[in-house]
Amino acid sequence: MISHTASALQYGALCWRVKNGRRQILLITSRETGRWVIPKGWPMEDRTPAGAAAQEAWEEAGVRGDVASVPIGSFLYDKVMSRRKNAVVSLRTRVRVFALKVRALEKDYPERKQRRRRWVSCSKAARLVREPDLAALLRAFEDA
């Protein structure tokens, strides 16, 4: 059984670069399930929404770069808060996504032992992620 609690807000970073004239997206794996996602996290008291997205990109993917101040879109997903024997409690979460042009990809970063990262085309990223709204955002970003 899955039960949903009230909705919440997170900020995410769509980390990108241009290689051979085409945009590429940096995807990372989630810690719990290993699915492909973008860096994201909760609001931070001492940071703007864009700043929080950039901080998450650093912590989760080792990214340094230039983050846009206005979100390019958002998507919904179910953040698993707890798992019990016969139930999963999840929080319906909206992620506001900020484009972050990658300047450097560091080898040493806080979550390096907990995640994998992978550069892929926008269209491949859209096929790899599970959230339909995020996939649509990735496809639109390829043509932006």
Image: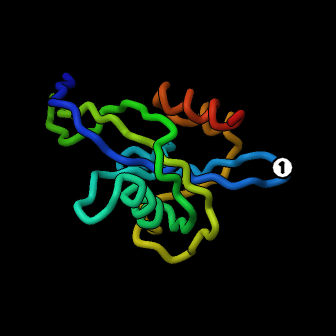
Q: Residue at x 62, y 70 (%)?
A: 104
Residue type indicated by callout 1: Gly
Which image quarter is the N terminus in?
A: top left
Q: Can see residue 29?
A: no
> Viewed as shown, does residue 49 lie left or right of 132?
left
Q: Which residue shows up at 56% across the image and 62% down it?
A: 66
Residue closest to the far bottom = 108
Q: Out of 14 and 125, give the one closest to the viewer.
A: 14
Residue 52 in which image quadrant: bottom left
User: Residue at 29% of width from left, 35% of height from top?
Assistant: 93
Farthest top residue in view: 1
**107 in relation to 128, above or below:** below
Read off the residue under disc 1: 21
Q: Is the C terminus in the top left, top right, bottom left or bottom right quadrant?
A: top right
| Label 1 SS | loop
Q: State the image coordinates of residue 44 (x, y, percent, origin top left).
A: 27, 59
Q: Is residue 28 left or right of residue 80?
A: right
Residue 29 position, x and y percent, is 48, 50
